[in-house]
Image: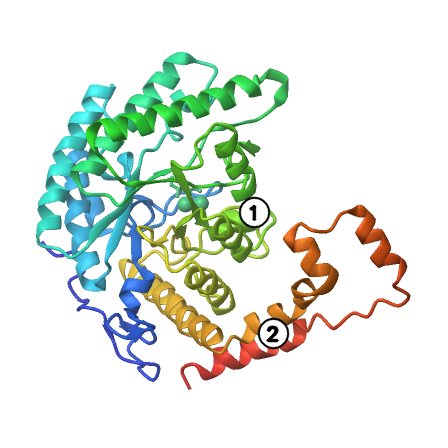
């Protein structure tokens, strides 16, 4: 059965096309610096936002019209798989991602939930045989059910720790079964509401114990996916333990987990943490910790995780700049952890949203590659730090200088001359490249 009957395969038609069901800039087979666009971008569909969620918000009920919603229970789960693979094929998207509860309903106990999962996982495996779409990553939802009210593996309740770990055990088995390239840990409830009732040290230690056990089990079953931590500063708890990349990296180093993980960086989480998207990508990149990306954007006027589809070309350009500087994302990809707006409730909107996101990152990719080829930003930065290539700067960098030598040097200085930071020059260049890349 078809759920998107009227829609044909989405093709690249170029910047002048007025077909809303065509890519204007994303041309999967187009080569860019030795790789195709498809290989560079490694797009993924987020199962939860596209097939499971109903678009409700804290003030209103769901609005989504989804043709598969006439079913319920396991029939609904099966219909979603059918719809999903039709959607993936029509979009020609190389990857998808899911949580356990997105694909199969929870039973009344762990055994029942796992049995439900087994049925749907077998069905997905079957569909994957005839599809080019692969699993970028899977994860488990250890945050929605009331048992996680006080946290999952950072709960005060050891039974909850065990339950959460058992769900992840199953998640790792599912990931292996479906050939997931990565496995994601987003610590939904791993944080706290108030210190007044919280043993933070025990919670952090337990979180680390759990990560070590997860890696041990993955090794035991021969699941070699890249483990990814997804930082988020707030929501649902007021303080999340993996606040941002810098604090997440410190946690990993404290608990000797730095070689086990990389980061899955979400744009909207970066801005909630008070950073730019590119800051988080950059911080991870320079520490060799950039693993994958949740490609979305926040709303500049709203202080919560709005998960909009990416359309800001400036942001996609600066993000792709970091990703290209990283030499790509390796096993990672660009997962659209993004949802259509509550008012965009038709099934067709799901296509328009993904087309917009894919085109936006294609523009970012091509523009960033040109900026890099011409060393537009690189040359300015190199020149800006040139004082560290000779004289006292060279001595500082090589470790030769000490406080005596620095004082001696400083005493010789009367006027320190400073060059311009040239921010406006750079911004004008970026605009120029953005507007001429497809001209
Ligand atoms: C929520 C997170 C979540 C993770 C996967 O804010 O972004 O969707 O990506 O659990
Ligand atoms: Ni995410
Ligand atoms: Ni998010």
Q: Residues within 10 Å of mark 1 (few under 14, many from 20)?
A: many
Q: Nearer the viewer, residue 297 or 294?
A: 294
Label 1 sits on a secondary structure element that is helix
Indicate the quadrant containing the N terminus: top left, top right, bottom left or bottom right: bottom left
> In the visual, does 55 lie left or right of 124?
right
Q: Does the beta carbon of the residue at mark 1 sit less than 8 Å from ligand 3?
A: no
> In the visual, does 92 lie left or right of 235?
left
Picture coordinates of residue 145, whole percent (x, y):
37, 26
> In the visual, does 213 lie left or right of 373?
left
Q: Which residue is mark 1?
A: 272
| Among the 4 quarters of the image, the one containing residue 71 | top left
Q: Is residue 272 something one can see in this rendering?
A: yes
Indicate the quadrant containing the C terminus: top left, top right, bottom left or bottom right: bottom left
The residue located at (31%, 82%) in the rendering is 17
Q: Which mark is residue 427?
A: 2
Q: Residues within 10 Å of mark 2 (few under 14, many from 20)?
A: few
Q: Nearer the viewer, residue 256 or 37?
A: 256
The residue located at (37%, 29%) in the rendering is 142
Q: Is residue 108 something one can see in this rendering?
A: no
Picture coordinates of residue 157, whole percent (x, y):
44, 13
Picture coordinates of residue 47, whole percent (x, y):
28, 47
């Amino acid at each position: 059965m078809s759920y998107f009957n009227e829609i044909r395969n989405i093709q690249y038609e170029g910047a002048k096309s007025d077909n809303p069901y065509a890519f204007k800039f994303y041309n999967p087979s187009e080569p860019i610096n030795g790789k195709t666009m498809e290989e560079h971008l490694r797009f993924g569909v987020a199962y939860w936002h596209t097939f499971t969620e109903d678009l409700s918000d804290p003030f209103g009920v769901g609005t989504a019209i989804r043709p598969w919603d006439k079913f319920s229970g396991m029939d609904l789960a099966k219909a979603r798989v059918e719809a999903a693979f039709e959607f993936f094929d029509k979009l020609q998207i190389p990857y998808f991602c899911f949580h356990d509860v997105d694909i199969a309903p929870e039973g009344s106990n762990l055994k029942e939930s796992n049995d439900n999962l087994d049925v749907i996982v077998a069905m997905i495996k079957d569909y994957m045989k005839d599809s080019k779409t692969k699993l970028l990553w899977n994860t488990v939802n250890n945050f929605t059910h009331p048992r996680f009210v006080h946290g999952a593996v950072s709960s005060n309740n050891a039974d909850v720790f065990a339950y959460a770990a058992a769900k992840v055990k199953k998640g790792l088995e599912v990931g292996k079964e479906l050939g997931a390239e990565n496995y994601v840990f987003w610590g939904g409830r791993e944080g706290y509401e108030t210190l007044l009732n919280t043993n933070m040290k025990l919670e952090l230690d337990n979180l680390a114990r759990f990560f070590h056990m997860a890696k041990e089990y993955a090794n035991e079953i021969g699941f070699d996916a890249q483990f990814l931590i997804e930082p988020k500063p707030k929501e649902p708890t007021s303080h999340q333990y993996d606040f941002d990349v810098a604090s997440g990296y410190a946690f990993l180093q404290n608990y000797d987990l730095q070689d086990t993980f990389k980061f899955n960086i979400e744009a909207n989480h970066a801005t909630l943490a008070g950073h730019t998207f590119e800051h988080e990508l950059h911080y991870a990149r320079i520490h060799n910790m950039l693993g994958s990306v949740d490609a979305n954007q926040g709303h500049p006027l709203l202080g919560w995780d709005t998960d909009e589809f990416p359309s800001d070309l400036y942001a996609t350009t600066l993000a792709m700049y970091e990703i290209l500087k990283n030499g790509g994302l390796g096993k990672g990809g660009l997962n659209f952890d993004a949802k259509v707006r509550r008012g965009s409730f038709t099934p067709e909107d799901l296509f328009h949203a993904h087309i917009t996101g894919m085109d936006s990152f294609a523009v970012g990719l091509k523009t960033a590659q040109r900026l890099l080829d011409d060393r537009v930003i690189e040359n300015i930065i190199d020149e800006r730090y040139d004082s560290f290539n000779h004289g006292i700067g060279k001595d500082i960098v090589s470790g030769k200088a000490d406080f005596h030598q620095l004082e001696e040097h400083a005493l010789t200085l009367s006027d320190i001359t400073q060059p311009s930071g040239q921010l406006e020059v750079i911004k004008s260049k970026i605009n120029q490249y953005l507007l001429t890349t497809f001209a």
